[in-house]
Each structure stands twice: as C-alpha cells, then as structure tokens.
Image (tube, rainbow, N blue to C red):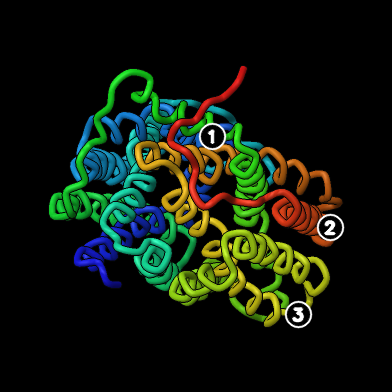
Amino acid sequence: MKSPAAKKLFVMMILEFFIWGAWLPLIFGYLPAMMLSEMEQKLILTTFPVAAIIGMFFSNQFADRNFAAEKFMAFSHLVGGLAMAALAFVKFDRPVIPAGQEVPSLYDAPFWIFFTLMAVHCLLYVPTISIANSIAFAHMKDSQKEFGLVRMGGTIGWILAAWPIAYILHGKAADEIIKATSSIFIISGVASVLLAVFSLSLPHTPAKKSAGSDNLAWLKAAKLLAIPSVLVLFIATFIDATIHNGYFVMAGGFIGKVLVAGNIDPAWTTVVMSLGQVAEILTMAVLGMVLAKMGWRITLILGILGHAARFLVFAFCPDQVWTIIAVQLLHGICYAFFFATVYIYIDGVFPKDIRTSAQGLFNFLILGVGDIAAKWFFIPLQAKLTVNGAIDYKQLFLWPTGLALGAAVLLAVAFWPPKELSSNVEVSH
C-alpha cells in the first residue's frame, strides 16, 4: 500500500467490519432464544436492509454534501455504538414456550426498546460502509491496485470478531450461551465507539459542496442507469446480491447437518462458514493484479461464477463433508471479484462529484434490496421444498445456481464498460 494514509485506512476497515461481524452471526439464534415471535424477529432483522435503502436517499446524500466524511463517521459510530451496547441491557421476561407451540406476537415494551435501538444503530451504521469506501478512495494513489489491500482489513475485522466469540461459546450449555451472547452487543458497541474516536484521526475528506440540482447527487447517480453498461451492472448486482444474501439464509442449517453427518460438532458451523473470509483476504490481496490482467467484465463474471460453483457442490455433493467445507473458500472469489470490483469500478468510472452517492446507490442493492429479496424468495422456497421436516437441498441450491449463471451470461453479452462516464448526464423522458 503506497498511500501515506493506507495504514489508517486499513485500521478503519478492521473496526468498520468488526462492529458488524460481532453481532450478526449470533443474533439469528439470540432472538428466538429470547422468545421473540417470527414477526418480531423479521422486524428486527429488517432494520439493516431498510437502513441501506434509506441511506441511499438521505444519509449518503447528507454526509456527502454537508459533512466532512471523517466527522460523519465519528458521529455515526458514537451514537450508533451506544445504541448497540444498550441492546445488551434489554431484558425479555417471557415464559418458555413448549416445543412445537408457536411463539405469540407480544410486541411488549422490551421488544419496542430493542427494535428502536437496533433501528438507530443500523440507520447510522449502514451509511458508514459507503462513507468508509469514499474516504479510502479519496486518499489512495491507485485505487485499482490498493483498494483490495485496504478492504482486506474489513475481512480481517470480521474474522477477529466472529471466530473468538464462536470459540468462547463452543461447548457451553444452552442457558450459558444465551447469557454470554448478549455480550456481543457490548463488544460491537465498544468497537463502534473506538472507531468514532479513531475516525477523528483519519485524513480530512471535506464535504462536496455544490448548488442547484447537483445537491441531489443520488438522483444524478440514479440517472446514470440510462447508460446501458450501468443498467446491466445494476441488474447483475441485484441478482448477485440476492444470491449472496441467500447464501446466509440457506447455508447455515445445511452446513450444520453436513457437519453432524461427518461427526463434527455443529457448533463449528459459524467457523466453517467464515473460512470464506480467510480466502477473501488472499483474494483481496491479488484483486488489483487480476483486474489489471482480466479487466472489469471477466473479473465480475468470475465473481458470479464462484456462487454457481459453490451451490453446485452443495446440490450434488451433500455427503462429501470435507468437500463442502473446502468449497467455502470460494467465498473469497464471490465477494472480492464481484462486490469489491463494483466499488472500484464506481470510483474509477463514475463522475467524481457523485461517487459517494453512487456507492450508496449500489449499496442500496448489496445491503438493502438484495437482502430483502433473498429473504422473501429463499425462505418461502425453502419452506416449499420441505417435506416432513426434510429439505430438498438439491432443488433448493439449483435455484441460486441458475440465477448466478444467468447473471454471468448477462454480463458476458451486455456489459461493455466505458473508460469513463460523462459528468453531464442527460436522461430523456
């Protein structure tokens, strides 16, 4: 990393994704353990993608045009971190529901407090993902070569959060796990406050002041969808984001059953799934070289085909325990070669005055709409393919395989990116 500020940017990414990695993997088990109903759980878990959608229209625009980026980071992580830490102190005094009996929707005071705190955290945290990218791009000499290395810090941060927590909880009784799991919110909150303080030491990234219609930078970024190459990338990103988020919806239960069949404690499911982050570190390190040799289109196609390959193995080799474990390493290619490449492409091709808003536009898909679409599509599909408690995983995993192959063909046929997009975007009506 040649940029003088690279080390600080690297640490920024570590803390940025440590915050997320500390709470996300375990909250899926924590909420039902607190006797929250299915609807209550959905409402809480939807706050993150909804924040990504709102962020495109408000938070990114507000930050990009009115605040120095590092100050926005400091404020968001301070307030969002305190909200996250407070979640640990919300107590649900609900009776234990007998197995097989549906948990009622209670919507009592503890639920609304928990929901509000999570919403505050997400509304402030999600936009900082785009802002962190913008700060990094603003202070790198060669983003195509350096961003992969800087963003690698985020992958390391996720692992530093998820792996130790999984190890600490391994082997504990159910009641001990529930009690210990609440500490994830404090760990995440403390990391957020640390990043708030650290953000004040980041390189100054001033607000982009402009007048007139340019103040609606997100709208100008959206108008770029009239350009065929941008529209094709937007559609492919939506498909890939749906598949990517669908992986987390479908893979946990599947891998847990695979580990049990292989006489491996299913408590290691989180660690097995996180092996992809290890591969992501290596992939990020070579991303610049791959982009230089293969270009935008081939790199993006390889990223999508990584999903197809992984789900094909899931579908046709469910009894091969170590093959299933090993194929998790494809996650590095899936993430780095597609999503990280999209971020680099935006910085390298989009007009300078709307890049932060353009990052928000694509995060609208990656973190928002894609997440919601994955839940709305794959959860009902999984239920439809479940007979007598057994899921037809072959049929289930062929769906994301087909979607990935379709997106790859779309890019191969229709994505011909220009070297640079004009800053004077005109859209006919």
In the drawing, does residue 201 fall left or right of residue 211?
left
> At 49% across and 30% down in the image, what residue appears?
425
x and y percent of residue 341 in the render? 51, 59
Label 2 vs 1, first from the N-terminus:
1
Q: Which mark identifies residue 392?
A: 2
Three-letter residue code for mark 1 = Leu
Q: Earlier in the sequence, mark 3 or mark 1?
A: 1
Dividing the picture into quadrants, the one containing residue 293 is bottom right
Residue drawn at point x = 48 percent, y = 74 percent: 289
Mark found first going from the N terminus, 3 or 2: 3
Residue where numbered disc 3 is placed:
320
Q: Secondary structure at mark 2?
A: loop
| Residue type pointed to by label 3 | Gln
* Front residue of 283 and 267: 283
Quadrant of image for the C terminus: top right
Image point (37%, 57%), residue name: 17
SS label for mark 1: helix
Tell me residue 238's x, y (percent).
63, 44
Element at label 3:
loop
* In the image, residue 63 above or below residue 135: above
Within-10-Å neighbours for mark 1: few <14, some 14–19, many 20+: many
| Residue beneath the point at 42% across and 50% down | 347
**Is any atom of residue 290 visible in this view?**
yes
Numbered tag placed on residue 224 in the rendering: 1
Q: Could you say which quadrant of the image residue 424 lies in?
A: top left
Left or right of residue 327: residue 191: left
- How far apart are labels 3 and 2 at the CA level? 17 Å
